[in-house]
Image: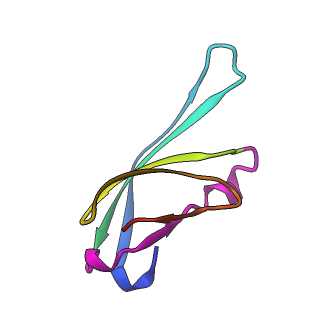
Amino acid sequence: MNKEAECSPKVLENTIVRDTAGKHADLHYLFDLNCSKPANLKQMSITLFTNYKRLKEIKVESVGPAGQKSTTAKPQSNIILLN
C-alpha cells in the first residue's frame, strides 16, 4: 500500500480450500484496511508470491472510495491499482 493513505490491515479470514483430488488449492484471504486517508490509497502490492512459490495468480476484489474493482495479480505483476 502506498504510505500516504496511512492504512493498517486486519486479517479477517485465511483459509485453504483443496479440490477432492488434492491437485488444486485456493487460498481465500479476506482482510480489511482501515485507512486514515482512504482517498490517498492508490495501489497495493501483493506479497503472497514471496511466501507461496507455487502460487500462479491471485484474483483480487476490492471495494473502496473509487468503487468496486476486480483484477488479477501474478508474480511478475503484483501491484494492484485501486483507482
> Is 4 displayed left or right of 20 in the figure?
left
Residue 11, placed above or below residue 8: above
The residue drawn where x is 61% and y is 56% is: 48
Q: Where is residue 73 in the image (x, y as percent from the top left)?
A: 58, 54
Side (left or right) of 40 relative to 55 = left
* Colour logic: rainbow
Magenta residues, start to end: 36-54
**Depth check, front residue: 37 or 52:** 37
Residue 12 on the magenta span: no
Q: Quadrant of residue 51?
A: bottom right
Quarter of the C terminus within the rendering: bottom left
The one nearer the camera, 32 or 67, is 67
Query: Is residue 57 placed above or below 49 in the rendered structure?
Result: above
The reply, left or right, for residue 60 in relation to residue 51 is left
Residue 79 image offset from top left, x and y in percent: 56, 66
The quadrant where residue 26 appears:
top right
The x and y percentages for residue 9 are 39, 65
- Residue appearing at x 61%, y 62% in the figure: 78
Residue found at the far bottom of this picture: 4
Q: Which of 18 and 39 is in front in this view?
A: 39
Q: Position of residue 8 (x, y in %)?
A: 37, 71
- Relative placement, left or right, of 78 versus 67 is right
- Answer whether residue 45 is magenta in the image: yes
